[in-house]
Amino acid sequence: MMERLREGASSIWVKIILSLIIFSFVFAGVGSYLAGGSEQAAAKVGDQEIGQRQFEQAYQNERNRMQSQLGDYFATLLGDPEYVKQFRRSVLDRMVNDVLIEQRAHALGLRISDEQVRQTIVTMPEFQRDGKFDNDTYNMLLRRSNFTPDQFAEYMRGDMLRQQFLAAIQGSDFALSNELVALRKLEVQQREVRTLTLSLDEFTQKAEITDEEIQAYYDQNPQQFTRPEQVKVAYIELSGKGLKDTIAISDGEVEAYYDDHHAKYSSAEQRQVSHILIQGDSDEAKAKAEAVLVKLNEGADFGALAATDSDDTFSAKDGGKLDWMEAGVMDPEFDKAAFALANAGDISGVVQSAFGFHIIKLDAVKASVVKPLADVKDSILADLRDQKAAEVFYEMQETLAKTAYEMPDSLEDAAAAVSADVHTTDFISEADAPEILKNPAVFRALLSPEVLEDGLNSDVIELAPEHVIVVRVEESRPESVLPFDEVASSVKGRLAAQKGEQQAQQKADEVIAALREGNSDILATESLSFGEAQTIARNGGEPTIARVVFTLAKPVDGKAVYGMTRDASGNVVIVALDKVVENDVEAIATDSQMAQQLEQMHAQQDVMATLQVLRDTSEVAYPALDTATN
């Protein structure tokens, strides 16, 4: 229970269950995640479909994110078809969970207003520069992610809706004082134990192994003594790491770059506007908005009309005034009209947006300002070094690829062309290859007919951005069963270890059975004895012993309770639990850290239970997976 409590405290459960960290997907390019279509459905949740393209894009984005975090290790994992299958299913399950949560939130009447979406977007750190919302950064990231502002706003609305639903579940959990005291008592409980160790080495050394047994084991288990296909490898590794430190940038280059990219170092024009909103898209709503416009043209006060006639109750309190904004943030029609106004005080006509009919007044304008060169010089230097280093690396990569191809019988010429070294290995298999060669793409190249059989250099293989390798096979030997004489001693050792482990286990079972029946004479008969009594805490002492000790029943009438485990060396350890030591604890406040941890654990369980109920009561199908299975 205490281990689960600690796990609940350390896990960020919402992230794991529903992937509420938006940008792990968004800025990997998940724009088409929102796009529907008539293609085959990857999953169906009631009447709502998750399209195959939609799923494939989300899968690719999550794969890219994992690749950036785990690097070559993740590439190795992707070499296992079973892992890829499970990984794909986990991404699709998360997408289904998102749909289930949104459907339930809508059914409960939960809503996210346009203003909430806008405020969330403008305060996102990803869109900030110098502590303020930066419209250029915002638009750049949206374009890179294949989003329009409307699509991104709807994506955010869905994500915020899920968070609102989850927050309602999380906020309903609480911890009782007596529950906290009971858990604390379990946590600080101690147990008095004695241990007796049966040495595995002693049983192994005493194990009698015949030649017939050794031969029979070898004959029956050839796979254990099969040497895999092996190769001796020569390779050239090329990495861009450290290239930036060798790149020199002149002041003239910095100034030229600055002059060519003024927009990049300029703050966006900002405008402050007031508006009057008449909600709806009916002729009646439009007529009402036009009537308000007539009053304004006749000299009515804009702020006064906003206070009495605007359906935007938040801005109406301040005469319709909105926060400073940049182009591209608001609804496209609203945005277009607001930035078409020329002078402070100008009023637009009636503008229709997705939210209704607006009348917009321009209050003030902050012009775009270019940052001084001195303020952005370091940033420019970094950009130029990145660019030049990338150019140098890819020139070297092209030279390596060309020379390795034109001189296919050796890597020496290719190495000389890029001033690199040729590295070599002894005979290796994929399992024991150096880390750089364990990449699945590398070993596929090594075992390809052109490289393995024809003795040619491989193509350039990309291990990671600006990190490539070219390989060749210098010598190979096929998979084969090792001769009996080479492995006989190893077989004997394995058999002795197996027999020793079996005999140690049998002896432990025999001793424990006798002790449980009250026959302690077996200890003297077997020349065994328990060590001195020791008191251990739940998180103290040898972990393997503590784990088994705290699962044993409480001793009754002073009779020891017995259990068994193994230590880190594989020795069998018999444990005698003599006494449970209860400790008094003080009352624990329901607003303490422990209470919060318990509430988080409860919340995690509630969310998982809620998802299970939603799945059980909804029609969820996986057509693409079902087709693949069939």
Image (cartoon, rainbow, N blue to C red):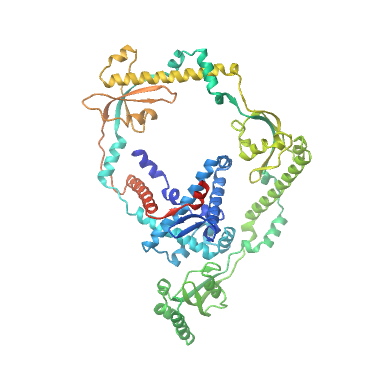
As rendered, which of 517 and 399 lies closer to the eye?
517
Q: Quadrant of residue 84?
A: top right
- Residue 547, x across and y down, in percent: 36, 31
Q: Is residue 156 visible?
A: yes
Position above or below: 36 against 349: above
- Residue 524, x across and y down, in percent: 31, 12
At a point 55% along the width and 20% down the height, the residue shown is 219
Q: Quadrant of residue 506?
A: top left
Q: Quadrant of the N terminus?
A: top left
At a point 36% along the width and 56% down the height, the residue shown is 168
Judged from this view, the residue extending furthest toward the bottom is 298
Report whether 598 appears left or right of 275.
Answer: left
Position above or below: 487 against 255: above
Report whether 188 appears left or right of 439.
Answer: left
- Residue 497, x across and y down, in percent: 47, 19
At a point 40% along the width and 52% down the height, the residue shown is 615
As rendered, which of 32 and 224 lies closer to the eye?
224
